[in-house]
Image: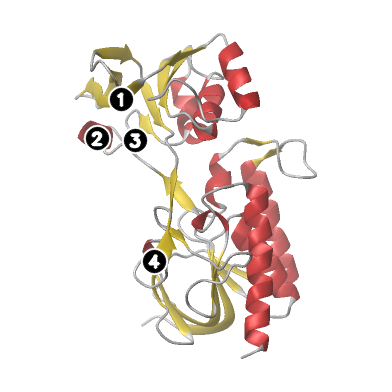
Amino acid sequence: MGETRHTRVLIIGSGPAGYTAAVYSARAMLNPILVQGLQPGGQLTITTEVENWPGDTHVQGPDLMVRMQAHAEAMGAEVISDYISSLDLSSRPFTAKADSGTTFTADAVILATGAQAKWLGLPSEEKFKGFGVSACATCDGFFYRGKEVVVIGGGNTAVEEALFLTNFATKVTLIHRRDSLRAEKIMQDRLFKHPKVEVLWNHSVTEVLGDETPLGVTAVRATHVETGKTTDIPCAGFFVAIGHAPASELVKDQLELHNGGSVKVEPGSTRTSIPGVFAAGDLTDHIYRQAVTSAGMGCMAALDAEKFLAGH
């Protein structure tokens, strides 16, 4: 049997929201425990250049997260490398079970589990995952040096991935199901000006094609959304960048959710439908989804938790 540990504040997740919540709750003498989860540092660890973090004209995403963790620990937060596999919010203290066998009990919980990449849901995509199909250009772009790649999506993520891949690939084809992108204008300008990038409008990817031995991608089949005409685009790598889904599996049957799985909070606060449980960052924010807004919500969650605990 693993040990049982009690804390006044348990923070689940380790992106900007989680670490900021840890800084503030540690400064409030609440001795928080932060459990990092499967991807310590969250989505920023798979982002290279961050140009919109105030105070840094540009900073590497992983470096920023290392600094945030160090800051939280310097303030007195305990950061644990583990994964919370189940969470019981039916009574206080709340109970969380970790993969390591440790059970955590907590008077208040701050959820900062973020979001995860969405996939197309094609059997062929699943088959080639890790063998030419990826949702992270910064993780896997290096493998496509001197090769052609395809990116699907139309938002900031897709444009960032496409631009990043131009550092390695000879050609990057961006496929989008509409006739215009949702990405910020400055990002679109960079994309359209880049000599290595070609955009294929009004198409969706309906199949990933490849070799069996060794397993690897050779092309993607793009289908015109109106005519149904298909085109095979040769590539060695296929990057899916169609957005992110909130990582709310832990609480989906316990807390009120909305907008495709985001945890619902009271307007202007981080309070969820269960008193003593707070949510911050991409888990609850389906609109802004920025590192700086996540950090701001982490601060709010810690202050909300401190106020809650003072009254109990």
The picture places residue 298, in percent across and down from the top left corner, at 64, 63
Residue for badge 1: 205
- What amino acid type should be assigned to the residue bearing mark 1? Val
Badge 2 density bin: few <14, some 14–19, many ≥20, Cα 10 Å: few
| Pointer 3 or 2: first along the chain | 2
Quadrant (top left/top right/bottom left/bottom right) for the N terminus = bottom left
Q: Provide the residue designation for mark 2.
A: 122
Of circles 3 and 1, the one toward us is: 1
Q: Residue at coordinates 48% horizontally, 16% vertically from top-left?
A: 169
| Location of mark 4 (residue) | 250
| Mark positioned earlier in the residue sequence (1 or 4) | 1
- The answer to whether 15 is drawn above or below residue 128 in the figure is below
Tell me whether the residue at label 3 lies in contact with that at label 4, contact meaning CB atoms closer than 8 angstroms.
no
Q: Residue at x 34, y 35 (%)?
A: 130
Q: CA distance from mark 3 to mark 2?
A: 14 Å
Q: Badge 1: how crowded within 10 Å, few (<14), some, or many (20+)?
A: many
In primary-sequence order, the first of circles 4 and 2 is 2
Secondary structure category for the residue under label 2: loop
Is there a contact, CB below 8 Å, between mark 1 and mark 2?
yes
How far, Cα to Cα, is label 3 from label 1? Answer: 18 Å
- Identity, as a three-letter code, of the amino acid under mark 3: Gly
Quarter assignment of residue 49: top right
Q: Are marks 3 and 1 in contact (CB under 8 Å)?
A: no
